Image (tube, helix red, strand yellow):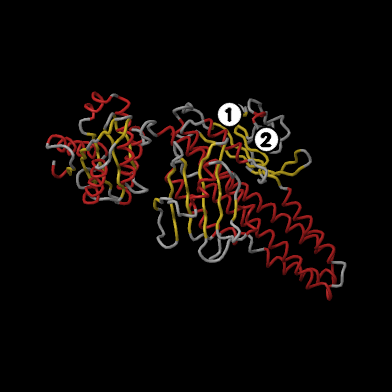
Amino acid sequence: MQSSGQKDIDWLFPLKNKILAGIIVILSFSMAVTVFFIVMTLRNDLLNNSAVKTRELGNAVKSSVKKLMLMRTTGMIQNTLEEIKSDNSSILRAFILNRSGKVKYSSDKREIGQTMDRLSNISCTGCHHKDNKPPSQSTIILEQDGKKIHRNIMVIYNEKSCYGCHPESQRINGKLIIDQSLESTYSLISRLELIIFGSGFVCFCFLLPFISAFLNKYIREIISQNADRTFLYNMIERLSKSIEMDELKHITMDIIKESLDADEVFIIIPKVASDYSASEWNNADSEVTRKKINDGDPLKNVLKRWMGKEFSATEMSEDRKRIYIPLEKNSILLALICVGKTTGTFDSQKHDLITIMAGHITIAFENARLYHMATTDELTGLYTKRHFKYYVEKKFVDYEQFGDKLTLLMIDIDNFKKVNDTYGHVAGDTVLKGVSQCIMASIREDDFAFRYGGEELGVILPASDSKSGRYVAERIRDTVELTIFQEGVHKIKVTVSIGVSTCPEDALNVKDIVLSSDKALYKAKTTGKNRVVLSSEA
């Protein structure tokens, strides 16, 4: 099946045949007029195609920036604009103007604070005129420092979700502007022009096959560049859809396996104290699962090198069956992506594409890391109560739209006050952190664990019923009961009580599922502790 990007430039091969036929007509009738017409047609088509791709990139960036604006994360907005412009990118500049024309964010920090007058700035007067009529286009070709660029301007309208920061009377909050270099496009146009005009002066009977081969070469180059560019635009759009670390891992795995035709993908996320979490996807299982990297695993040595910061650039194994993509920002390890093939080898020519991919994925993981820090409890590493409310409301929307069930476990550490009173609050923190680790070790990759308050913890199990909920709850209870928590010379053992509630059997909204699981937890506490009670039993 052809991709949309491939279909966009399928016209090049028929155009090549027209060019060859035109050369014959030129030599017979009117070479100069016909060749000029073909060149201008090709030129306009390439520039129009570049304009379309520039708008696609702008829309993807606008979508990402809009989400960050709603979250009021100004640092992430500036960080995203800075990273969009890189040495390997055709993007020259990206910046955001407020309503008065002042630069609020820019890929070049030196421009922040400058004001652009639309009626006097030479880069604005191409669209804006003194008659105050609105511009008739949102994409224009400009010349800056002797270079041709495509400028794409996207208006950031004042929508209802923006009224918290902007007055409702405003129609427009600002504009996102992206400048993209046309150097490679004009270079291709120039080379094609030379080929076409030069071929007209040579006897077509002898050079026609060679002309066709030359045109094929450059058409394939255009197709290759178009395919890579289309892929990168799609990748940016997909990465911008979420800053949740778990969702981002799934999106990244999909991008990697599709772009590199991989048979297996591993993503390793660093944690505190030289610890890590690893996720795995492979063709055999076709689902993302947790992975434990044992001493005999080939990834063990790679993991050791990476966590020791012994390599920071993309590497390919000598047999070209493994690719290692380390993600790092400001000396902070973000993730290690390991890609493998069980049959065949990777194309070594894709190194540049992989490098560019790694840059964009790094931006996404950096934003996800900052968001994760803002939504997790510092002691336990579990999500906060505030983020729980956001997540459980989202799951109820999924239930209303798609009928997806969910189960809530409310967990309380039995006699936790006695632990604090007997061993001190430091030991209490050790127990609380240890129980949280037991919970994380007992649930799936897609399950959601949180600290509800004090010693009360919880887990949301998507796509689960009460039977599954009881099974997971018993596994958590059993794991905690068998674990010894060490604090200094003290060896501490605790138990947990768990209440289980399921949507839609026990509740049809957020308030009711919390209340029903709390009632089940209360019964577990009052009937002996160290037990699991379903809401239906309470």
Most foreground residue, 358 or 443: 443
Q: Which residue is mark 1?
A: 99
Q: CA distance from mark 1 to mark 2?
A: 15 Å
The residue sitting at 71% across, 35% down in the picture is 125
**Location of residue 329 in the rendering, given as x and y in whole percent from the top left corner:** 56, 38
The residue sitting at 23% across, 26% down in the picture is 417
> In this view, which residue lies farthest toward the front?
489
Q: Is residue 260 left or right of residue 495?
A: right
Most foreground residue, 300 or 385: 300
Q: Secondary structure at mark 2?
A: loop
The residue sitting at 28% across, 24% down in the picture is 424
Q: Is residue 19 left or right of residue 265?
A: right
The residue sitting at 30% across, 35% down in the picture is 485
Residue 273 quadrant: top left
Q: Which residue is mark 2?
A: 128
Going by the numbered disc 1, the residue's amino acid type is: Arg
Vertical arrangement, residue 243 with respect to residue 104, above or below: below
Q: Is residue 534 left or right of residue 198?
A: left
Going by the numbered disc 2, the residue's amino acid type is: His
Instruction: Say few, some or many: other residues with alpha carbon within 10 Å of mark 2 (under 14 / 14 to 19 / 20 or more).
Output: some
User: Of marks 1 and 2, which one's residue comes earlier in the chain?
Assistant: 1
**Location of residue 150 in the rendering, given as x and y in whole percent from the top left corner:** 68, 44
> Do the numbered discs 1 and 2 sit on residues whose CB atoms are within 8 Å?
no
